[in-house]
Image: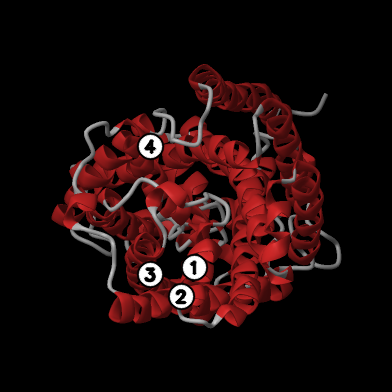
Amino acid sequence: MSDEVTTAQAASPASEAGRPHLKRVLGRRDLVLLFVVAVFNLNVLPSIAANGGVTVWLWLISLLLFFWPQGIAVIELAHRYPGEGGVYLWAKEVFGDFHGFLSGWCYWTNNMMYVPTVMLYFVGVSVFVLGPSHAGLADNKNFALAASVVLLALLVILNIMGLGVGKWVNNIGGIGTFVAAFLLMGLGVVVYMKFGTTVHWADFQIPANPRSVLNSFGVICFGLVGLELASIMGDEIENPEKNMPGAVAWGGILSGLLYIGATLTLLVAVSKDSISVLEGIVQAVSHMAGRLNVGWIVPPFALLLSLSIAGIGSAWLGGSARIPFVAGLDSYMPAWLGRIHPKYATPYAALIVHATVSLILVIVNFRSTGGVQETFQQLLSLAVVLQLIPFLYMFGALLKIAVAENFVRGHYGRTTLVLAGGFGLLTTILGIALAFFPAQQIKSLMRYEIWMWGGTLFFIGLAAFFFYVYGSRKAARKLAANSPAV
């Protein structure tokens, strides 16, 4: 390993002397399932498929220009800068402390909004376990809020008990995702062979007014993130140098195939004008099952999908909570966020804070929007913008490393890093810009733009506040420690 990698390894937050160490419990199989459950999110598919067949082309573009570069970036940066923190650590090592903090902060705060969308999607799907007659509960604000609180509390408790326990929620979610996706696509194939389809080539052409489709590109890029998640838990991976590259490759290939197959199936099964952003997957299965006279399959399918969604929520809640944990250790946020549980050795304070803020955001959006589906879409769009900011740093880091005069080959050569960094950076910028175009579920354009611009500026400004306020305290403590005693 090069001197550059060795130096970075010594400087990583989790490896410094006196810092708490977390347990290495994630093997290669756990990583592959974690990638699938984190990347392949069925909950974003309905809001994308609702824009029609043109989104299939957007999937292919995003897989080539965003997803492939993301895999390159994760493998290369994890190789050069191993340790707990992932996007936080990488941006810090390449661009400096503030950029590292901002990258990690946006990654964390985006998940404060994304985790609630997972909870709402869980509600929209799980009611079908009780039978189609209870489907209306998904649009009931009080029920949706209560069910979200219960699931959020359960996932926090399991993650506090440790990844040794919490990873089984992720693994069960990954298995549930595979089974649910293959069942969805299997029904689609049978329906197509038996009845044909009403989807025509014209459905895959760009519509006359593409405004509502534009938002989908940002959501698709958002749906493809997740390969970097395991690196945030770098100190909890068994033999990361050996296990990470293969797990990233398999997780990426499986997720890409599942996304395209599930989108096509959804378009075949349900008219794009009839797709609900919360119930779209179960809606499609229910429609196809009815045509094939196998309606009994809907409740067990909804149960499988509910397990998958719970796994998604657990993966993102547990993974992103490591960001404030490391920031607390670095003294850029309150030090108590860096505490670990005395029994389970997990960042319990960061997990509790994450869940509390997520709950507050759900309540605020329920009060300000017209319904559960609009709340879902507003939270999702702002999460897209904040989520993609760390990827600007990831791809920018590849370019900076590649053009350096003292370049030392890591996992990949200079040409690969330049191509991956360039394509990834341009695609990420485009995804962020297009997220500001409202989706068709948004009823008030002004309220949406205020939410998007205000939310983005608020969270970036809050990052600067924490960094400079707590950073000055860190500098003062370091100066005091270095001063001779009087």
- What residue sits 52% from the left and 50% below the top? 276
Q: Are marks 1 and 4 in contact (CB under 8 Å)?
A: no
Q: Which residue is mark 1?
A: 287
Left or right of residue 470, residue 425 in this image: left
Q: Which residue is mark 2?
A: 291
Residue 81 seen in render: yes
Q: Residues within 10 Å of mark 3 (few under 14, many from 20)?
A: many
Asked which secondary structure carries label 2, the reply is helix
Which of the two discs, 4 and 2, labels the residue nearer the N terminus? 4
Q: Position of residue 437 (x, y in %)?
A: 39, 29
Give the mark toward the camera: 4 or 2: 2
Q: Which residue is mark 3?
A: 258
Frontmost residue, 4 versus 390: 390
User: How far separated are the C-alphas under marks 4 and 2?
Assistant: 32 Å
- What residue sits 67% from the left and 53% below the top? 119
Left or right of residue 458, residue 160 in this image: right
* Quadrant containing the C terminus in the rendered view: top right
Amino acid tagged 2: Arg
Q: Residues within 10 Å of mark 4 (few under 14, many from 20)?
A: many
Q: Which residue is mark 4?
A: 215
Q: Residue furthest left?
A: 415
Q: Are marks 2 and 1 in contact (CB under 8 Å)?
A: yes
- What residue sits 82% from the left and 50% below the top? 146
Q: Residues within 10 Å of mark 1 (few under 14, many from 20)?
A: some
User: How far separated are the C-alphas under marks 2 and 1?
Assistant: 7 Å
Give the mark toward the camera: 2 or 3: 2
Which of the two discs, 1 and 4, labels the residue nearer the N terminus? 4
Q: Position of residue 253 (x, y in %)?
A: 32, 71
Give the mark toward the camera: 1 or 3: 1
Quadrant in which residue 343 is drawn: bottom right
Is 335 above or below relative to 31?
Answer: above
Amino acid tagged 4: Asn
